Amino acid sequence: MRLLRTPDDRFADLPDFDFDPKYADIEDPHGGLLRHAYVEAGPPDGPVVLLLHGEPTWSYLYRKMLPVLADAGLRAIAPDLVGFGRSDKPAEIADHSYARHVEWTRALAFDALDLRDVTLVGQDWGGLIGLRLAAEHPDRFARVVAANTGLPTGDHDMPKLWWAFHDAVENAQVMDIGRFVQAGTRTELSDEVKSAYDAPFPNEMYKAGPRAMPGLVPTSTDDPATEANRAAVRQLSTSDLPVLCAFSDGDPITAGMEPLLREYRGAKGRQHTTITSAGHFLQEDAGERLAEVVAGFVRDGS
């Protein structure tokens, strides 16, 4: 597996993102050692909050949340998924699979960082990956915050707007990462912020991860990830693991997944939160408010 690594100077002087990058090497049976990047804020002995981003963003998405969580006494960790941010980038679309992304993230969180009693915050692919980890390693997790995400199995149709995004990525000769992020927010992003989202990808060679992800979402029941996701849904549906839904009010892509998540045992009877005036990337539109919800959930101890 051929790996690319974004030059460090691409990340110089990003607006509102002065967190020092950290790195861990993880083993991959096909690619040898992969460098997995992350940033963190807050006391190193504080309760752990694992912030997993989605497609086509990176840990920069959590820049508004990290200080709020740190001020609440939490150890907030925001990785860059493999293929994104400062993490190594497998160069071929075929190098990426749902199973590999779950395993790469597991290796960082548990093998490299040995995280325990984790509060997961998963949005978009951060939930597709994080919910699998919570189902398959329940002893590592204390609670889950699901924000504009879900566990698709192919048993339900994806919305037309998602298919439009899927086709746009598939057909784009040049994938404009900043434009795709802007399309998922209600906030008007500055040119500097859009450039920050573009920073990990100097040219099209580096974009195999963002190009691959839409095609890895299970959209039919013969998808390679269907059975693993069905098993995860069964586990979470009967688990006492506390689950809080914090979806935005402006994301037609994932809105249909929220009722399914609310049927999990750990979600029933809970007062869930709707983040108002926010789109798909609610961390951009209302990151501080979402962080306060997460901190309150941890503080309540449920």
Image (spheres, rainbow, N blue to C red):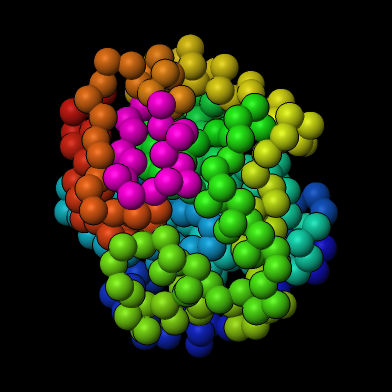
- Residue 295 is situated, as x and y percent measured from the top left of the image, at 22, 41
Q: Quadrant of residue 159?
A: top right
Q: Establish if 82 lies above or below 124.
A: below
Q: Is residue 215 visible?
A: yes
Q: Residue at x 42, y 18 (%)?
A: 263
Q: Is residue 121 magenta?
A: no
Q: Is residue 251 magenta?
A: yes
Quadrant (top left/top right/bottom left/bottom right) for the N terminus: bottom right
Q: Residue at x 40, y 53 (%)?
A: 280
Q: Quadrant of residue 135?
A: top right
| Nearest to the observer: residue 82 or residue 237 | 237
Q: Establish if 287 lies above or below 90.
A: above
Q: Left or right: 300 with respect to 230?
A: left
- Residue 180 is situated, as x and y percent measured from the top left of the image, at 50, 68
Q: Residue at x 46, y 54 (%)?
A: 53
Q: Is residue 45 visible?
A: no
The single residue placed furthest to the top in the displayed view is: 238
The single residue placed furthest to the front in the displayed view is: 160
Q: How many marks?
A: 0
Q: Which residues are magenta?
A: 243-259
Quadrant (top left/top right/bottom left/bottom right) for the C terminus: top left
Q: Left or right: 239 with respect to 302?
A: right
Q: Residue at x 50, y 87 (%)?
A: 9
- Residue 117 is situated, as x and y percent measured from the top left of the image, at 39, 32
- Residue 67 is situated, as x and y percent measured from the top left of the image, at 23, 60
Q: Left or right: 207 with respect to 165?
A: right
Q: Establish if 82 lies above or below 192.
A: above
